Image (tube, coloured by chain):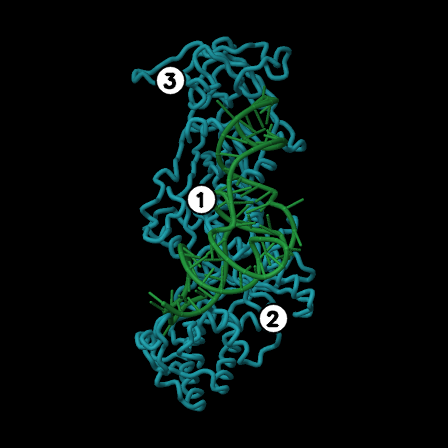
Amino acid sequence: MEPAAASDFIRDIVTEDIKTNKHGGKVITRFPPEPNGYLHIGHAKSICLNFGIAQENQGGICHLRFDDTNPTREDVEYVDSIQEDVRWLGFDWGNNMFYASDYFEKLYYYAVELIKLGKAYVCDLSGEEMIAYRGAPSIPGKESPYRNRSVDENLDLFARMRAGEFADGAKTLRALIDMTSPNIHMRDPALYRIRKFEHHRTGNAWCIYPMYDYAHCLSDSIERITHSICTLEFEVHRPLYDWILEQLSVPRPNPRQIEFARLNLSYTVMSKRKLLQLVQEGLVVGWDDPRMPTVAGLRRRGFTPEAIRHFCRRIGVTKFNGLTDVALLEHSLREDLNKRANRVMAVLRPIKVVIENYPESQVEQLEAVNNPEDSTAGTRKIPFSRVIYIEQDDFMEVPPKKFFRLSPGNEVRLRYAYILKCVSVVKNELGQVAELRCTIDPNSKSGGTTAGRKVKATIHWVSAAHALNSEVRLYDRLFTVEQPDAEGRDFKEFMNSKSLEVLTGCKLEPSLANANPEVRYQFERLGYFRADPKDSKANSLVFNRTVTLRDAWAKEQGH
RNA sequence: UGCCCGAUAGUGUAACGGUAGCACAAGAGACUCUGAAUCUCUUUGUCAUGGUUCAAAUCCAUGUCGGGCAGCCA
């Protein structure tokens, strides 16, 4: 699919394990989302890593596994969206889609095994008591008074927990490890809790649910995962991951947990909790709002899976917790779109231009190149007539020194058409520019005899009589600061009030009449756009701006 | 004042004891019927201090700074 990614410390480990035949030469990774939210660009990094490593190695496989061990926060809406997003990103799990809940019965019997080994016990401490007994990072914990129950008693109690004899929270099953461990996760962590809550897949079959630390390592083991790749915050869980598998009669060798740094992107937030907050509080229009860093949002905005994959390859994989510049994502996008998007002309903020020396009834069909980066993309015809629209930004009555565009008495080239000269400015009663009276040089037609005459600038235009009306939504970054959720900040205070600008009355060239949302366009000199898949209709077009073009003029002006 | 992890240009990432590279960003220029793309050039870096070594970004020690860990969340 893509050129092989440069190696990284995780791929090095995988390569080494293949070389030493640790897992019989197999590579099985997994992407294990909890179905409690939509996937975002950070998940895409993990997806590209896990599926990428599987693809790069002979016979490698990547499982999609839903980590659905907490019925109180999970929902099928999310399992559907997650599958759609992974597939859209271009990855295929084949028949290897699983749910941790598929393993509840096995997990239960492993827990029984742990009890029989004297390595787990049923504890009656309440939540608050357990916190008190746990100690603190620098203070050792205290042993639970229920820690020394007999194996038989534990077996009986655990069976009765499953049978629903106890209230929610009344008891837990805990690993018996070491209450004085410097690693808090080793201080007799809970393995099972009672939750009389309907699970989206197992219904009411269970009222005890396994905890992440217990379910995850065993799910990996059951699926014969070779490399269990997760983010840095699970680093301190690794001793527990290993401990659980070491106690039990599971197949060897055990999967190896490897941690890498999650993606942080500038000018956005990446936690599911905060994204959910934006959705629930109506600060965005939904999980797929084009301003969201969710896969669904990026897709709706017009990102391509290729651009996202290239981005994920470029950022690399390390254990350093950094902040990636969103400009790198935008660069990956432009790079991809530049190669594949056909060019069209659209005027977002129109000014009417009357060409005084062009016959009233005349219409010419001018030939335009669809994509200068792709010789197979062909050409199309664009109508030209006496009244056209040009961009407000392309005219200034009193131009500053480096302004190359149209101004009174000055000439510009109309893309694919004639050189245009502004002869007068018509203003409305407010003194604003209402209309431009211009003339063309009839000998300057593109491809014509004197077409080679140079002018400083070329601008885009749309014939008024043939223009399509459209709404265009201009998106900008959701936040005004690089790290809206830096410590001590309330990220919502930094929302960019200009993150969405809706323009109506935009004028498009007629070839856009049947724009398919699947097709991305470059509106020349403006950016990349695509029809909104939800809101655009044949008779009321709506376009989303995916990303602007780089703009040296804007930079020149100090933005 | 506990434990774990990390630190290379502005940002992200390579260099696996032997010439500190790459990409993005930024700046300058060329080209241009997109102020785009493309091309050329430029600026900026090994957290600190010791040690080992012929040789240290790399190994060791100490310190500094940053991140993570005290859900019956994942």
Residue wearing tag 2:
A224
Indicate the position of residue A244 as horizontal and vertical percent values. 51, 76
Percent across and percent down for residue A28 are: 62, 65
Circles 3 and 2, Cβ within 8 Å, touching? The answer is: no
Q: Is A157 above or below relative to A324?
A: below
| Residue A202 x/y as whole percent | 47, 71
Q: Colour of chain B?
A: green
Quadrant for residue A246, please give it.
Answer: bottom right
Query: What type is the residue that disc 3 sits on?
Result: Ala
Q: Give the Cα separation between the discs numbered 3 and 2.
A: 71 Å
Chain shaded cyan: A
Q: Which residue is mark 1?
A: A290
Specify whether residue A448 is in view. Answer: yes
Q: Chain of mark 2?
A: A
Identify the amino acid type marked 2.
Answer: Arg
The correct choice, above or below, for A282 with respect to A98 in the image is above
User: Which residue appears at 43% of the width and 44% of the height?
Assistant: A291
In this picture, residue B23 sits left or right of residue B63: right
Which one is nearer the viewer's eye here, A558 or B45? Answer: B45
